[in-house]
Amino acid sequence: MKRSRMLVAVFSLAAVVLSGTMMLSAPAQAVTGVMVRSEMNGKCLDIKDWNNNDGATVQLWGCHGGANQRWYGDAGMIRSDMNGKCLDIRDWNNSDGAVVQMWSCHGGSNQRWYVDAGMIRSEMNGKCLDVKDWNPNDGAVVQMWSCHGGANQRWY
């Protein structure tokens, strides 16, 4: 049963990342996205402190379903329900440990993603969205890291 729920979640996440037909024709608040949860602990991908600015920190936090935890796909980009901004790799950094942040969408490869076996991978370098140091706590840093398939790199 757990495996079937996981497969449904992975396909739902893939649909969020890959959907290219959902466009913003109304304010971002009108879009209803999905929560993206870490397989490691079930916590949600979260924009820290509801920060609307470019450069806002992306972290893990206990799920509450707020707009800062809801995401939708747009042409391979992962956008926030809160403000329509994109999940972004800061400064096009290809290194392990690169910062993941929110930034105004421009469609560059540092803002385009795909799902592979539950891992969210960057089109820029194929690296994975990763919970740093397997930290299970609220506020855990989300970064880019070479893919190894651990639970800190799998999302549903």
Image (cartoon, helix red, strand yellow):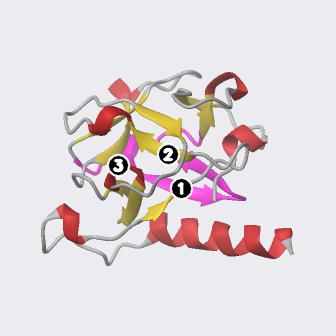
Q: Name the residue carrying label 2.
A: 45
Q: Does residue 56 appear left or right of residue 44 in this picture?
A: left
**On-image quarter of the N terminus:** bottom right
* Residue 36 to residue 150: above or below: below
Residue 60 locus on image (x, y percent): 53, 37
Q: Do callouts 1 and 3 mark residues in contact (Cβ within 8 Å)?
A: no
Residues under labels 1 and 3: Cα distance? 11 Å
For residue 90, which quarter of the picture?
A: top left
Crowdedness near tag 2: few (<14), some (14–19) or many (≥20) residues, C-alpha within 10 Å: many
* Residue 67 to residue 127: above or below: below
Q: Name the residue carrying label 3.
A: 68
Q: Look at the numbered disc 1 and give the secondary structure of its residue.
A: loop
Residue 64 lies in the magenta stretch = no
Residue 104 locus on image (x, y percent): 20, 43
Q: For this rendering, which residue is in front, 2 or 65? A: 65
The reply to whether residue 108 is visible in this rendering is: no
Residue 120 locus on image (x, y percent): 58, 50
Q: Name the residue carrying label 1.
A: 36
Q: Does residue 46 appear left or right of residue 135 in this picture?
A: left
Crowdedness near tag 3: few (<14), some (14–19) or many (≥20) residues, C-alpha within 10 Å: many
Mark 1: amino acid: Val
Q: For this rendering, which residue is in front, 30 or 104? A: 30
First to last magenta residue range = 105-128
Mark 3: amino acid: Asn
Q: Do callouts 2 and 1 mark residues in contact (Cβ within 8 Å)?
A: yes
Q: For this rendering, which residue is in front, 13 or 127? A: 13
Q: Look at the numbered disc 3 and give the secondary structure of its residue.
A: helix
Mark 2: amino acid: Leu
Residue 49 locus on image (x, y percent): 32, 33
Crowdedness near tag 1: few (<14), some (14–19) or many (≥20) residues, C-alpha within 10 Å: many
* Mark positioned earlier in the residue sequence (2 or 3): 2
* Mark positioned earlier in the residue sequence (2 or 1): 1
